[in-house]
Every structure is written in structure tokens, then in C-alpha cells.
Amino acid sequence: MNLHKIKTKMTTKTNTPLEIFVEAGTKYSWCSCGFSKNMPLCDNAHREFSDKKSFKFIAESTKAIYLCGCSETKTPPYCDGSNNCRS
Ligand code: FES
């Protein structure tokens, strides 16, 4: 653990999957640290507040999808219900 990154900051996590619109072939970064101001997508807040890295994925089709909003899923970037999420 990198001690210089430990700061007091509220996360922006939610206990529900969050909808985003994606375009086929475009690369996205899902937030795994929970500090992004652009949840569920990464805004590089982990560089200051966490050692966790974003999860990169490429959209297979153009459509609205739901991504994990709690940053605790075991199947990133999608919700797996591991946080008793509201869906
Ligand atoms: S919103 Fe994160 S596991 Fe469901």
C-alpha cells in the first residue's frame, strides 16, 4: 500500500448499477476505486486517492449498458450483485 495516497475523502460509490451509453469499438475505463466524480467511469482520481487502477474495456455494440456503481463487483465492469445492489 502506498501511504502517501491515504487521504480523507468520501467516495462517490452508489449501491446500484449505473447506466451509460457506449459506442461499439470505443474504449472505456470503469472506476474501480470509487473516487471518480464521473461514476461509473474513471476520471483518474485513483492516482491521488487509491492504489486501484481502472478497468479498461471496449464496447461490443452501441447501446445503453449498466455498470457496477459500487466498485466492488468481482466481474468488472458489470454488476454481479455482490453488494446486495438495487437493480
Ligand atoms: S453495483 Fe457493484 S456489484 Fe452491483
Image (cartoon, rainbow, N blue to C red):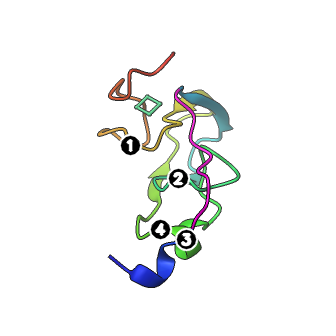
> With respect to residue 36, does 51 lie above or below?
below
Residue at 41 percent across and 64 percent down: it is 52
Label 1 is placed on what type of residue? Pro
Residue at 43 percent across and 34 percent down: it is 78
What element does badge 2 sit on?
loop
Disc 1 to disc 2, how far (Cα)? 9 Å
Label 2 is placed on what type of residue? Cys
Disc 1 to disc 3, how far (Cα)? 25 Å
Disc 2 to disc 3, how far (Cα)? 18 Å
Using the image as rendered, state which of residue 35 and residue 27 is in the foreground.
Answer: 35
Quadrant in which residue 71 is drawn: top left
Find disc 1 in the rendering and name its residue.
Answer: 76
Q: Nearer the viewer, mark 2 or mark 3?
A: 3
What element does badge 1 sit on?
loop
Residue 31, label in figure: 2
Using the image as rendered, state which of residue 59 and residue 43 is in the foreground.
Answer: 43
What element does badge 3 sit on?
loop
Using the image as rendered, state which of residue 79 and residue 21 is in the foreground.
Answer: 79
Find disc 3 in the rendering and name its residue.
Answer: 7
Who comes first in sequence, dot 1 or dot 2?
A: 2
Segment tinted magenta in the rendering: 8-15
Give the x, y percent position of residue 22.
64, 39
Who comes first in sequence, dot 2 or dot 3?
A: 3
Crowdedness near tag 1: few (<14), some (14–19) or many (≥20) residues, C-alpha within 10 Å: some
Find disc 4 in the rendering and name its residue.
Answer: 50
Label 4 is placed on what type of residue? Ser
Who comes first in sequence, dot 4 or dot 2?
A: 2
Disc 4 to disc 2, how far (Cα)? 11 Å
